[in-house]
Image (cartoon, grey):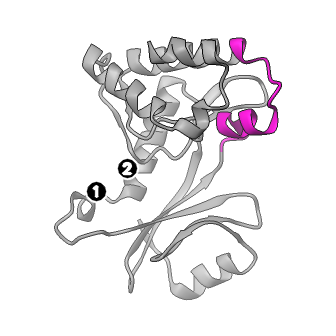
Amino acid sequence: MKKLSHDDFAAWSKAAKVLEKDRYGVKVLHLADGTFLKLFRRKSWLSKTTFFPPAKRFAANAAELHRLGIRCPVVLGLYHMTDPYRSIVHYQPLEGITLRQLLNEQPTLEQIELFADLASFITTLHDLGVYFRSLHLGNIVKTPDGALGLIDISDMRCLGKPLSKGMRRRNYQHLLRYEDDWALVHPQIRDHFHS
C-alpha cells in the first residue's frame, strides 16, 4: 500500500463528489475521472484490520471474484493515510444499476425474470464458495449487458468450496432482513424467497 499525503488526497477530493460520510469523515468519493475512492478507518489497534486492512481485503476479494468470473469493481490502487489512519482503495466502479435503484426507479418493472436471475446468481455465488455477509439489493448490480455483479465487497469471504446449507441459509437471511427493499417486490416473489 502506498502512502497518500493529505495534500494529494485534498487534490483528489477537490473536484470529487462525496457519496458517503459519517461522523468520522468521508467514506466514499466519486472522483472527477469517474473512479472511486473508498476509505476505511481503523476501529481499534487490537483489530485484525491492523494486519489485513479492509482496503487490502477489498482488493483480494475483487481479484478472487474476477478469477471466478463474477463481475465486480476493478481495483486501481491501494493507499494509506495517517493522522487519522485510513486504508484506501481506488477502483473503477462496476457499471450498471443496483437492484435497489432498479426497483425504486421502475415500479412497473417485470420482476419475475429479474428475481429468477437473482436466485440463479446467488446459487452460483454459494456454489463457488462466496459468502457475502453484506448481501442486499443495494450491493447487487445489473450491468448494461444484463449480467449481475457485486459491489462493496470488503465484507466477504471466498472459501474455495461450496457453502454449507447453514451458511446459505444465513446468507439468505441477510438478504431478506432489508424490509424496505422487499416491500417493493411482488408478494408472490417475496414469499418464494422467504420460503
State left or right for residue 114 relative to residue 65.
right
At a point 67% along the width and 31% down the height, the residue shown is 184
SS state under label 2 = helix
Q: Which residue is mark 1?
A: 52
State which quadrant residue 183 falls in. top right
Percent position of residue 20, x then y: 59, 64
| Precedes in sequence: disc 2 or disc 1 | 1
Q: Residues within 10 Å of mark 2 (few under 14, many from 20)?
A: some
State which quadrant residue 167 falls in. top left
Dots 2, 1 in contact, CB < 8 A: yes
Q: Which residue is mark 2?
A: 57
At a point 46% along the width and 18% down the height, the residue shown is 194
Q: Which residues are magenta?
A: 94-113
State left or right for residue 166 relative to residue 122.
left
As displayed, is residue 161 above or below residue 2?
above
Percent position of residue 117, x then y: 63, 15
Amino acid beneath label 2: Arg
Percent position of residue 9, x then y: 58, 79
The answer to if 82 sits in the magenta stretch is no
Q: Residues within 10 Å of mark 1 (few under 14, many from 20)?
A: few
At a point 28% along the width and 56% down the height, the residue shown is 52
